[in-house]
């Protein structure tokens, strides 16, 4: 990984195609509860078998953003300054006259430091107070049961370009609130309740609640990394977390409700390795934006985690460059595209449910490659699509994929290795069931909205095999993932059509098209 001349700040590496061989072969896990197939005229039942697929190759970005300097365990802090808020403010500063000055005026505390290895611990309550830090060196700031409200500016304002380790002390609850308006400042950026010019790295096992009345709740003009801790943003006038260079998450629990974006990186990249995210926003849920500086690649990579994203007017997850999902649990409900990328989407694993009320479910403005996972992508009516890549290459090599909408992009047979079928419409809450003529189930799915076109791909679809399509019926003893049944017994409804997989991509109804951007 490359770094800039600031204190080990990671710059984005290109979100290009990476091919990593994995020694695991495709696995098939089958439920054997009922292997007997009866004649359809006698109300036949068919067992539903779960299929788990692991791709033999992961395509896209697998970067973990590993940087040992971001780990608190690799830093040493030898002096501690404590600040306790209350009706009076108490300061214990062993470095007074030795490089650290702490001043206070009307509840606002200002720290100036020129020395290394300093830790600060803040606690107590102030209904109109704040903390501002100027530091020439990296430092640690522990929130140890502090409740700060600043009526005319940020609650915490770090005017330092150095790394700040923010520790949420174990078993503590903390809260930060800023003012609706800020007093004028000619020289300093102040964009959030918790603002920093430098890197913010959150850890610890405590919690903090941050309200963003003026603009963002958390903002760094460098990058934000969340390693652990619970961060709750009950409201923000703009973004929940806003960064300039990068956002990285390795864990933690983040819950936010905002009038802007949930997590936005303005000029750089996003890597999420793990964590639990509940994001309710008006605009984008998670977004890596474009910068005119071509050395910055606004890619977005998710390697794991649990995501519940609801957007009333925007997109769920967006990258202006490459978007890669390698694993994770996703429930995304949006007005605009559920998942969108500017140049390329790779999905290699995970369980994804994506539902757009007015646009595409998954939309790549360039290529789209699906190699694994269980993906249900729901788009709106024509011309919106479940899977949309604007007639660019649509490659399928693995996974269980169901895309419904007004139309679908056509998988590219010349590069795909897994079969797909495109079928005509269905209605809300109706069961659709596809099985081979010799009685082996391929799909059992409860339709989440009325649609004109469905694209289905699975390793259960076999070349030259003939299939029957049923609608209605019922499932007993079953479990489903967002309507996709992975076990149970299907009691047959009405047979509506048959088809034979005569090519890698077979169309028996519905429509294909470029879709919207």
Image: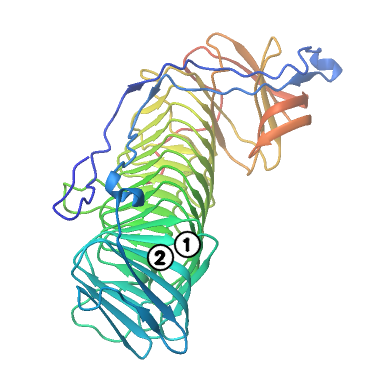
User: Residue 187, located in which quarter of the rendered image?
Assistant: bottom left
Residue 147, how many percent across, how many down?
48, 76
Residue 194, how many percent across, how many down?
37, 70
Way the structure is coloured: rainbow
Question: Considering only vertical position in the picture, is 334 above or below 405?
Answer: below
Residue 434, how many percent across, how many down?
65, 22
* 497 horizontally vs 411: left or right: right
SS under mark 1:
loop
Question: Considering only vertical position in the picture, is 289 above or below 197?
Answer: above
Q: Are marks 2 and 1 in contact (CB under 8 Å)?
A: yes
Viewer can see residue 388: yes
Residue wearing tag 2: 142
Residue wearing tag 1: 169
Taking the spot 61% from the left edge, 12% from the top edge, the residue there is 466
Towards the viewer: 89 or 59: 89
Disc 2: CA contacts within 10 A as few (<14), some (14-19) or many (>=20): many
Question: Considering only vertical position in the picture, is 395 above or below 196?
Answer: above
């Amino acid at each position: 990984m490359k770094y800039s001349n600031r204190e080990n700040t990671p710059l984005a590496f290109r979100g290009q195609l990476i091919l990593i061989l994995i020694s695991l072969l495709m696995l098939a896990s089958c439920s054997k509860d009922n292997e007997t197939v009866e004649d359809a005229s006698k109300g036949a039942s068919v067992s539903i078998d779960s299929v788990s697929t692991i791709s033999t190759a992961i395509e896209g970005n697998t970067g973990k953003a590993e940087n040992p300097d971001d780990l608190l365990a690799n830093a040493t802090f030898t002096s501690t300054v404590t600040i306790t808020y209350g009706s009076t403010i108490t300061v214990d500063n062993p470095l007074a006259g030795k490089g650290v000055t702490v001043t206070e005026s009307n509840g606002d505390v200002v720290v100036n430091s020129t020395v290394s290895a300093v830790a600060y611990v803040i606690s107590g309550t102030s209904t109109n107070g704040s903390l501002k830090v100027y530091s020439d060196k990296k430092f640690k700031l522990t929130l140890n049961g502090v409740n700060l409200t600043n009526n005319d500016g940020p609650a915490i304002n770090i005017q330092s370009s150095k790394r700040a380790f923010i520790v949420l002390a174990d078993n503590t609850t903390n809260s930060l609130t800023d003012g609706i308006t800020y007093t004028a400042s000619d020289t300093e950026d102040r964009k959030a309740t918790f603002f920093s010019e430098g890197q913010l790295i959150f850890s610890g096992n405590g919690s903090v609640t941050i309200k963003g009345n003026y603009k963002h709740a958390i903002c760094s003009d460098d990058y934000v990394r969340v390693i652990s801790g619970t961060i709750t943003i009950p409201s923000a006038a703009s973004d929940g977390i806003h960064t300039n260079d990068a956002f990285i998450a390795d864990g933690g629990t983040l819950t936010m409700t905002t009038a802007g974006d949930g997590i936005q990186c303005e000029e750089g990249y996003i890597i999420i390795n793990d964590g639990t995210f509940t994001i309710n926003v008006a605009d984008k849920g998670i977004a890596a934006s474009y910068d005119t500086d071509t050395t910055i690649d606004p890619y977005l990579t998710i390697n794991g985690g649990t995501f519940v994203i609801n957007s009333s007017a925007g997109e769920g997850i967006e990258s202006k460059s490459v978007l890669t999902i390698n694993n994770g649990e996703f429930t995304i409900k949006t007005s605009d595209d559920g998942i969108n990328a500017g140049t390329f989407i790779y999905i290699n694993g995970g369980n994804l449910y994506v539902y757009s009320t007015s646009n595409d479910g998954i939309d790549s403005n360039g290529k789209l490659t699906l190699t694994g996972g269980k993906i249900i992508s729901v788009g709106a009516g024509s011309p919106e699509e479940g899977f949309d890549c604007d007639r660019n290459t649509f490659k399928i090599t693995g996974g269980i994929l169901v895309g419904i909408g007004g139309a679908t992009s056509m998988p590219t047979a010349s590069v795909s290795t897994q079969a797909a079928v495109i079928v005509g419409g269905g209605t809300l809450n109706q069961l659709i069931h596809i099985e081979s003529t010799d009685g082996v189930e391929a799909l059992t799915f409860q339709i989440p909205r009325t649609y004109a076109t469905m694209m289905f791909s699975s390793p259960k679809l076999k070349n030259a095999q003939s299939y029957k399509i049923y609608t209605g019926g019922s499932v007993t003893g079953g479990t489903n993932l967002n309507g996709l049944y992975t076990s149970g017994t299907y009691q047959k409804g009405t047979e509506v059509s048959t088809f034979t997989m005569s090519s890698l991509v077979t169309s028996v109804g519905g429509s294909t098209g470029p879709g919207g951007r």
